[in-house]
Amino acid sequence: MESTLTLGERLVAARERKGVDLYRAERDTKIRMRFLTALERGDDRDLPGTVYTKGFLRNYATYLGLDPDEILRQWRKEHGDFVATKVVVAPPRPLLQQPRALTFSPSVVVAALMTLGVVVFGVYLALQLLRFARPPVLSVTDPATATITASESATEYLLQGESSPGATISISTPGRDQPYRTTTLTDGTWSISVELRRGENMFDITATDPETGKQAEDPKQVVITVPFLVIQAPTLKIDQPVDGTTFENGAIPVEGTATNARDVKVEATYLGTADGTVTVTPAPSPSPGASPVVGPGPPAITLTPDADGKFTTPLELTAGRWSITITATSPQGKTSAQTRMVTVAYRGVNLVVDIVGGNAWIKVWIDGVLDEAIGASGRVYHTGKTLTFTGASSIEVRTGSSGVTHFTLNGVSLGALGAKGVPETWLFAPPAAPLKTTRR
C-alpha cells in the first residue's frame, strides 16, 4: 500500500500516475529539476532551507494531486523538524526600467518608407493592370437616337457623348479620307462638329485608349439625313477619266460622286480612229449586267451610287476616239450630265480570255515564252473565269475546249473561235488576224 512507501517513492509514484516527467514537472511547477530530484530521492543535502523546502513540498504535492499537509507530516517523520539551513543567495531581481519614449532610428524610418513605397507601387500596378484589361466605354448623348433627319439648311451637326477620360474619339464617314478626332475631357465628355451634305450622312464612332490601344467593344453609328429640295438637280463630279486622256488599253475607269442621284448612266460614242478618220462604228462586247441601247458604241451601263454617292465601273472600248457621257438622275427625274473625250490607242497585244459555258484547260505563251503563272502543264479553269494577258508582239493560247474559250483582242470581242470540246491553239499577233497553229 502507498502508506508503506517512503515520501520520495510516493512522489515518484504520483508523478508517474500523472504521466509527466521531471522536465514537464519543472516547467509546470516552476521548481528547478535538481530540487524536484532531491525531494523524490529524500536527499535534503541538495535542498535549500526549511522554508523553501516546505514550500516546494506543498506546491509539488498539490501539482501531483496529493494532500500537502500529509506530505509535510511524512517529511517531518522521515527527516525531523530541522533541516539544515543552507546559505541561499537569492538571485538579484531585475531592475524595473521605466519605459523609454518612442524613438525612430534612421534605419526604422528608411524601412518604413520602403514598405510604404512597395505598397503604393503595388496599388498603382494593380490599377494599371485593371486599366489595361478594360476597354474604354462609349456612348452618344446627342443625337439621342441613332437615326435622325436634320433641316434642309443644315450643313453641320455637333455630335456629343461620353467615354473614358483621356480616350481618343474617332468618327469616320464615307467620302472623308481622315476621320474626325477629339479627346475626352477629365469628366469623360466629348463633342465634335461634323459636316453634313444633302442626303444620308453616316458616322461610325469609336473610342480608343491611347496607352493600351484598346477600342470600345460597342462602337456606335449615327445616321443624319439632310433632305434634298424637290426641285434640286443631282450634283455630279467626275474623277476618272480625265478629259483628253489617251489609254493604251480599252479598260477605261469611270469613277465619280453623285448626290441626290437615283442612278448614274455611262454611255460611250465612237468618233473615229485615233488619227481623226471617221469609220464605221465597231461592235464591242456588252459589259456584264448592262442593258443594250440604240446607237453607236457599247451598251450603256446603269449604276446605283453607294451610300456616300460614289460610283465606279470599267468601260471596255476598242481602239479609236470616244465620247463618254455620264448622266446622274434624281428621284424626281432631274438630271445632270458631263462628257469626257478619250482616245484608245492600244500598244502591243492585250488579250482577255473568258471561260463561258463549261470548263477548259488553258496553256499560254507570251511573245513566244511559256507563261510561268500557268506553267508547262497548263491549268483547268471553270466557267466564269476571266484571264488577262499582255504581250509586246504576240500571245498564243492552247485551249482544251475551243467552244467555251472566248477571246477579246485589244478591246474587240472575237467570241469563241472553235467548237466546244475541241482542243485548239490560236496565235494573236495584231494587226494580223488570229491564226490557228499546231503548238501544243
Image: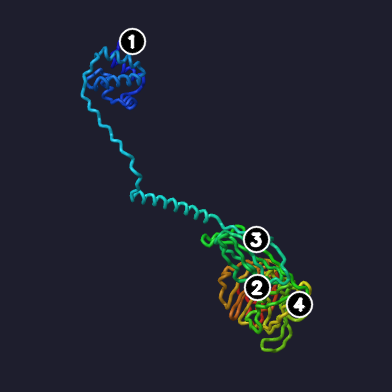
Q: Is residue 402 visible?
A: no
Amino acid found under the numbered disc labelled 1: Met
Q: Which mark is residue 141?
A: 3
Distance CA(mark 1)–CA(mark 2): 128 Å
Q: Nearer the viewer, residue 103 or 313?
A: 103
Instruction: Specify the quadrant that holds the C terminus.
Output: bottom right
Q: Which mark is residue 269?
A: none
Q: Are marks 3 and 1 in contact (CB under 8 Å)?
A: no
Closer to us: mark 1 or mark 2? 1
User: Crowdedness of circle 2 by 10 Å Cα count: few (<14), some, many (20+)?
Assistant: some
Residue annotated with mark 4 = 335
**Residue 149 appears in which quarter of the rendering?**
bottom right
Q: Earlier in the sequence, mark 3 or mark 1?
A: 1
Closer to us: mark 4 or mark 3? 3
How many numbered circles does the render carry? 4
Residue 97 position within the rendered picture, expressed as x and y whole percent measured from the top left: 30, 38
Amino acid found under the numbered disc labelled 2: Val
**Residue 68 appears in which quarter of the rendering?**
top left
Residue 376 position within the rendered picture, expressed as x and y whole percent measured from the top left: 56, 70
Residue annotated with mark 2 = 353
Q: Secondary structure at mark 4?
A: strand
Q: Nearer the viewer, residue 373 or 88?
A: 88
User: Crowdedness of circle 3 by 10 Å Cα count: few (<14), some, many (20+)?
Assistant: some
Distance CA(mark 3)–CA(mark 2): 56 Å
Residue annotated with mark 1 = 1
User: Crowdedness of circle 1 by 10 Å Cα count: few (<14), some, many (20+)?
Assistant: few
